[in-house]
Amino acid sequence: MNKKISLGLALSLIFISVALAVTVTMSALMYTYNNLIKDVSDRAGMYSGLSEIDDVIRGNFYGEINENLLNSMISKGYTNGLGDRYSAYMTADEYLEYKQLEKGEKGGIGAIALYDDVSKGLYITEVADSSPAKLQGMNKGDIITEVDGTKVTALNAETLLQQLEGDKLTEVTVTFTHNNTSKTVKVARGYTLQTVYYSQVNEKVGYIKIIAFYENTAEELKNALKFFSDKSISSVIFDVRGNADGFVRYATACIDLIVPVATEGTGALATAVDKNGNTIETFTSDSDSISLSLCVLVNAGTSGAAELFACDLRDFGVASLVGTTTAGNGTMQKIFELSDGGAVKLTVAKILPYKSESYDGVGLKCDTEVALTAEQNDRLPMLSLDEDTQYQKALSLMTDT
């Protein structure tokens, strides 16, 4: 039997509902308002403190103020104040260089070098095929002793390394020693940065060293894998030790060349999740893959995109990790361009790999732990493969498969 309620009771219920809705709404608005006021108050305090410092300096500083430098340092100080070493402010010139690096277009002579305390020169660790350096007879293991007539020392090494970079159609004069014979040559600059180096170890095993994950890395890796396929190579050692440069999207492009479509775990090669737990980007894969026995050499210098590369290959069950625990950088950065041509690189998300838990802050543990001595670690880029015990262990594992 249906029961009817009086008009008065109905109106009372309506008024109560409206009052409850208003109360809930007002509570939410008050919460937002209070947080906003606190934020405004905090910002006002920050701006007031900065203004006070500015007044003191402008009223008392003995010297000329470089306004551009001052503003740049204030901006850098703001991002440094986040306490996140992966976030940074870049001036317009720095951002331009950053974009060139991302695309692999940072011009050089086609040789990677670093200062060596033993030889007191710039030790060449890699030389790209068909590069200006290669065409002038430079090889891995050669020592650059002078750049544009200036002798290399520990103090000027970084400056002279920068002189090896430059635009196309420019040259730099380099003196280097090869097999104890000194040679001075003019070398063209502006060569595209090569990020993948590979060689055939024996009839069964290949070796691929990836120094960074940039826009051109996947294409270079594709060429390396084709070379090994044509040679009927069945096992490959990947080396991402000391690889701390690059971007998640370019690492996943490389992973996609190796593994099949992602069907388990997160359903993606990687997932970027913000501080509120929201997925802001996913990195998927296609069905193409390769059939090779793989292992990945890693160490404490393996960071960011390189860690994702190593983690996903293991998650898919196609590779084991050899070396020591990685850096533990499982975050993703995004670029925010500014009106003055500069930019802010800001950490915006944590990266979740294919199936594993996040390695952020903890790093990746190796399946086969092999530690180098302190001296070996310091000279890792200059070690011969015969001296490299981590590489030798990986080679033995690949040879036994």
Image (cartoon, grey):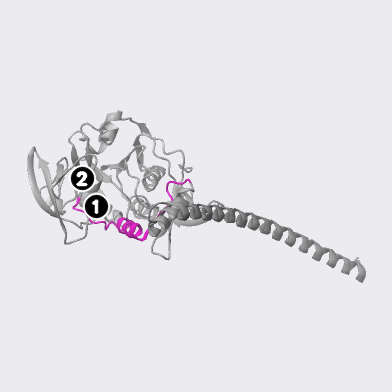
Q: Quick one: 389 or 25, which is closer to the camera?
A: 25
The spot of residue 108 in percent (x, y) is 21, 54
Whether 53 is drawn above or below 200: the answer is below
On screen, residue 175 versus residue 50, left or right, reads left
Identify residue for label 1.
194
Q: Which label number is shown at residue 126?
A: 2
Helix, strand or loop for disc 2: strand
At label 1, which amino acid type do we have? Gln
> Going 57% across and 55% down the picture, which residue do you hit?
43
The spot of residue 395 in percent (x, y) is 25, 35
Query: Which of the 4 image quadrants contains residue 239?
Result: top left
Helix, strand or loop for disc 1: loop
Q: Quick one: 354 or 70, which is closer to the camera?
A: 70
Outermost residue to the bottom:
7
The spot of residue 116 in percent (x, y) is 21, 37
Q: Quick one: 179 or 354, which is closer to the camera?
A: 179
Q: Which label number is shown at residue 302?
A: none
Q: Which residues are magenta?
A: 83-110
Q: Is residue 271 visible?
A: no
